[in-house]
Image (tube, helix red, strand yellow):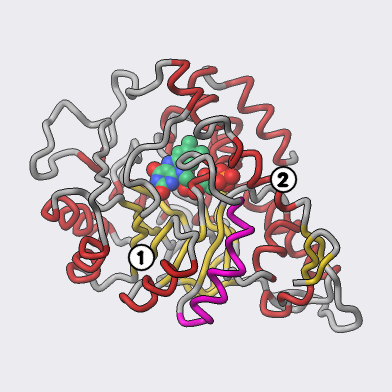
Amino acid sequence: MTLQAFREAARTVLDPVHDDYVAGGAGEERVLAANERAFARYSLLPRVLRGAEARDIAADLPGAPGASPVVVAPTAFHRLLHPDGERATARAAAAEGAVLVTGVASTTAVADVVAAARETAAEPAVWFQLYPHPCAEVTAALVRRAEDAGCSALVVTVDSPVFGRRTRDLRNGFSDLPPGYAAENMRGLPGTPPDVLTDIPMSPAIGWEEVTEILGVTSLPVLLKGVLHPADARLAADRGAAGLIVSNHGGRQCDAVPAAVDCLPAVAGAVAGRIPVLLDGGIRRGSDIAVGLALGAVAVGVGRPVAWGLAAGGESGVRQVLATLCDEYDHTLALCGGRSNADLTGDMVVREGLPW
Ligand code: FNR
């Protein structure tokens, strides 16, 4: 099944309100559209006569050596999409050798997510995503939970000082999880009321001090997700981040930012190899992965395609989505004369007819 077929299949099984929650973006959904459209402006300029019978597409990522170049980006509330929820996603990602970024907005507790991943791989890589909480004690408690569960890295999302205005959710009145579902990682945190488990607090006043505090309470590598400006990329590397994810939150936050892939070359240039850079937003085919890696990413994240795979086919659906992307990428790498990811270089990408 193609990724587009999974998208259509998800539409037929999901409650339309939940389908909108996954598919939608902020504002007029300009950025949502731009993320995907941007890849059509990039072409690959293959090298010839230097390939290999079998290619090595493994990526060395923080806390995940030899991982798939496709990372499962953090997306909220998987039990709304399939009864097996995050457990199914975890088993699938682990079986495909892909890093799963689970997060604070999971409808399954992080310890249970990691346990599920261990059902299909001896040493799965699960990262934990969180928003810096206005209260340092809460952030520290969340970090401890992720460490105790066996996560191998943290992802701090920094593009959400306030919540994005998601047009479809506002129109549909979707703001709360239905009864019986909760953001399980919020349960029992200091100062969190026992019955309000859908509200994930954000604060516009969060700054680099909060990031530094997180770095101080953990020995896990900490990646920052949602960096678009090269100056912030430099600051992140200077402050000790272990990696960056160039991302505009899949077009769900500010509806006036550039397509994520268009921000990648400047960010990669700014950190100049000091820390690894990942990309997410609009990745829908293997050649998108090749463009991202050639422009300086070590791996790419996918959000909605995984959600659609989960909705349409549970664990097997997620596995097929991840396997399809890797297979298409491997094929593209072969067509570009590559033996491994490092063979894709910036000179092999042409943007609207102009070499970078
Ligand atoms: C997200 N994303 C997200 N990011 C994050 O840091 N924490 C979160 O809880 C969520 N939740 C979430 C829910 C849903 C339904 C979507 C679609 C996205 C953003 C996600 O990690 C990623 O940046 C984008 O999804 C990437 O774009 P694509 O692959 O969906 O085009």
The residue type indicated by label 2 comes to Arg
Q: Please determine whether, in this image, residue 212 is positioned above or below residue 130.
A: below
Residue 55 versus residue 177: which sits nearer the camera?
177
Q: Which residues are magenta?
A: 259-274
Q: Position of residue 233 (x, y in %)?
A: 44, 69
User: Residue 37 has which mark?
Assistant: 2
- Reply yes or no: does residue 265 show up in magenta: yes
Q: Please determine whether, in this image, residue 254 is positioned above or below residue 356.
A: above
Please give the residue where the numbered disc 1 appears in the rendered image: 153
Mark 1: C-beta under 8 Å from nearest atom of ligand 1: no
Q: Main secondary structure of the magenta part?
A: helix
Marks 1 and 2 sit apart, C-alpha to C-alpha, by 31 Å
Q: Say which element carries label 1.
A: strand
Residue 203 versus residue 345: which sits nearer the camera?
203
Mark 2: give few (<14), some (14-19) or many (20+) Cα within 10 Å.
Answer: few
Q: Position of residue 270 (x, y in %)?
A: 51, 76
Q: Position of residue 26 (x, y in %)?
A: 50, 34
The residue type indicated by label 1 comes to Ala
- Reply yes or no: does residue 289 show up in magenta: no
Q: Which residue is drawn at the image coordinates 43% and 21% (left, top)?
A: 170
Q: Which residue is drawn at the image coordinates 74% and 74% (left, top)?
A: 55
Q: Which residue is drawn at the image coordinates 14% and 50% (left, top)?
A: 135
Q: Is residue 98 left or right of residue 208?
A: right
For the N terminus, which image quadrant?
Answer: top right
User: Residue 289 has which mark?
Assistant: none
For the C terminus, which image quadrant?
Answer: bottom right
User: Residue 75: in sight, yes or no?
Assistant: no
Q: Please determine whether, in this image, residue 297 is positioned above or below residue 13.
A: below
Q: Is residue 256 left or right of residue 114?
A: right
Q: Say which element carries label 2.
A: helix
